[in-house]
Image (tube, rainbow, N blue to C red):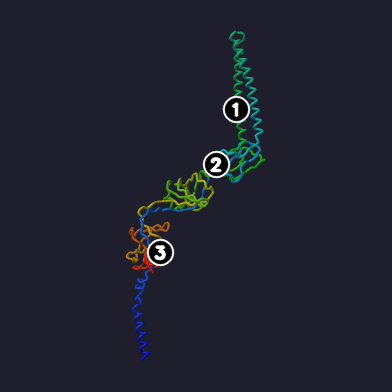
Amino acid sequence: MKIYNTLILLAAVAVLAACNKPKNAEEKAARNPPVITTAQVQTQTLAITEEAIGTLEGLVDPTVTAEIAARVIKVDVSVGQTVKKGQLIALLDATDSGLARQEAQAEVARIEVLLANQERNVARNQTLVDKNFISKNALDDATAQKNALKQQLQAAKIRVASASSTNAKTRIYSPADGKVEKKIVDSGEYVRAGDPIVQIIGNQKLRAHIPFPENIAVKIKPGQPIKLSTPTSNTIVNTTVKEIKPLIMADNRSVDVIADVQNVQDWQAGASINAELTLNEKTGVLMVPEQSVVLRPAGEVVYVIQNNKAFQRIIQAGERKAGMVEVLNGLEAGLEVAVDGAAYLTDKTPVKTSTQQANVEKNLP
């Protein structure tokens, strides 16, 4: 009898437990809904962009050369040194040019003495002609000699100026601001006219060459905004497309897009360049976070949260950018959609937002 009573008691406990057990998964989910985060469907302006990697070309990269033949006395710069426009770079031997200038100056002085004497002769002959002591032919000869000396004096002065110019060319100055990229000669070497001394690289004017795929060439126009960055600097440059080269590059089937960059101090010629070209802009575009879009057998869906329930909406997705997805249809602006945890939801699943969960925990004893 005692055993019989025990069995009856155990059967009653089992029946009670069965009554308290959730009848199905939906009832269990309703008692312990998943915690999610949400966001509103936003209306934004969406820029349609294309990215590519290119290179920077320096437009200011003069190779400073000798203008006369002479021996190098010294080179005042070294590789990597920053130079300013007009700074002395190198000094050449000025001995020969100095002697040529002195010779030309001596010739000027000699002709000036002869000319002064000839002018006096002309004045005397003019007096004698006026008194009929000599013929006018003698006066004409003296005047012709005076004019010839004037021409010789002018030529001698030109030689002085030429020698002075040659002498000045023994001092070589930087033609632009920049850094010394290459030091080609050194003290004691002999250079001829046209021989390079140093190469200077300036970053005042840089040109970006960016290859974009040929299939978007028809969409690229001069004046379109383009954002540039380079690994050698934290500076971002917003500029525009200057021009597009007409030929497709045969080696990679791309079009060369050119944009100019000016006066960015920490950018360097020869560096790589990251470019983001804005092809077009869409206004009034519906956007949702990328985590909200979930792939299901029906297609891409988003779960709209209403009255603490998740309702499945099939959508048509468009462009994806910066963690956001364009929604072409299937949603309206202002709706609240699931973000974190969306991948674990099904249609009409009860949910609890993270804000609600925080409030519950706050009220716990």
Residue 257 in the image: x percent, y percent? 47, 48
Residues at marks 3 and 2 touching, judged by CB atoms closer than 8 Å: no
Q: Please, what secondary structure does the residue beneath circle 2 have?
A: loop
Q: Residue 177: which disc?
A: 2
The type of residue carrying mark 2 is: Asp
| 132, above or below 158, in the image | above
| Residue wearing tag 3 | 340
Q: Which quadrant holds residue 301?
A: bottom left
| Residue wearing tag 1 | 158
The type of residue carrying mark 1 is: Ile
Task: Please report the residue visible at 65 percent of the width from the left and 28 percent of the height from the top.
Answer: 102
Q: Which quadrant holds residue 192?
A: top right
Where does the N terminus fall, quadrant-wise?
A: bottom left
Residue 28 in the image: x percent, y percent? 36, 73
The residue mark sitting in front, 2 or 1, is: 2
Examine the rendering and report whether any part of residue 248 can be seen.
Answer: no
Q: Is residue 202 left or right of residue 282?
A: right
